[in-house]
Image (cartoon, grey):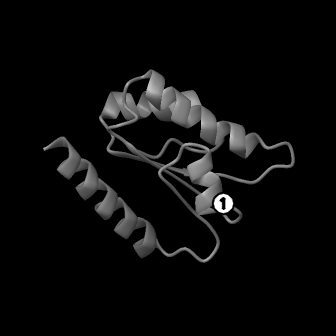
Amino acid sequence: TYLGTSVSPEKFIDAAVETGAEAILVSTIITHNEVHVSNMKKIAQLAVEKGVRDKVIIISGGTQITNDLAVACGMDAGFGRGTKGIHVASFLVKKKRALSDRIQ
């Protein structure tokens, strides 16, 4: 479900809970005052608080996002400049399989 632009972390998690989403993909813009970092951390924190963190894959992307930064903020992965859709799709499939194997 596309939620639009300038979406709050709360809206991402609420929508994921309401729709039973298996993944949340967030596009973020780097800011000088680190809003992108606090938003990624807040999304991860809210997912834990709402009891869905172990059920949903959370990915952040943007031109200056790195995997290390995203993971440090609680995301499952981060994809930056030069990423192709197949990279994200492949990660999603592998992560979903790993989650399914863990549950069984």
Q: State the quadrant of the C terminus.
A: top left
- For the N terminus, give its image quadrant: top left
* Residue identifier under label 1: 65
Which residue of the protein is positioned furthest toward the right in this rendering?
Answer: 32
Asked if 6 appears above or below 17 in the picture, the reply is: below
Q: How many marks?
A: 1
In x, y percent, where is residue 20? 29, 35
Seen from the viewer's position, the closer of residues 12 and 46 is 46
Q: Is residue 66 visible?
A: yes
Image coordinates of residue 13 in percent, x first then y, are 47, 31
Q: From the viewer's perspective, is residue 73 above or below residue 82? A: above
User: Is residue 7 at all visible to an observer of this figure?
Assistant: no
* Residue under the image location 55 percent in, 35 percent down: 43
Q: Residue at x 42, y 32 (%)?
A: 15
Query: Splitting the image into 4 quarters, where does residue 16 fall?
Result: top left
Residue in the picture at 37% in, 25% down = 51
Q: What is the three-letter code of the residue carrying label 1?
A: Ile
In-image side of 48 versus 95 (left or right)? right
Picture coordinates of residue 58 (x, y %)?
46, 47
Q: Is residue 72 left or right of residue 13?
A: right
The residue lying at 29 percent from left, 62 percent from top is 93
Describe residue 71's horizontal placement relative to residue 32 as left or right.
left
What residue occupies the far top of the structure in this picture?
49
| Element at label 1 | loop
Dividing the picture into quarters, in which one does residue 73 lie? top right
Where residue 63 sits: x, y (%)?
Answer: 68, 66
Mark 1 packing: few (<14 Cα in 10 Å), some, or many (20+)? many
14, above or below 39, in the image? above
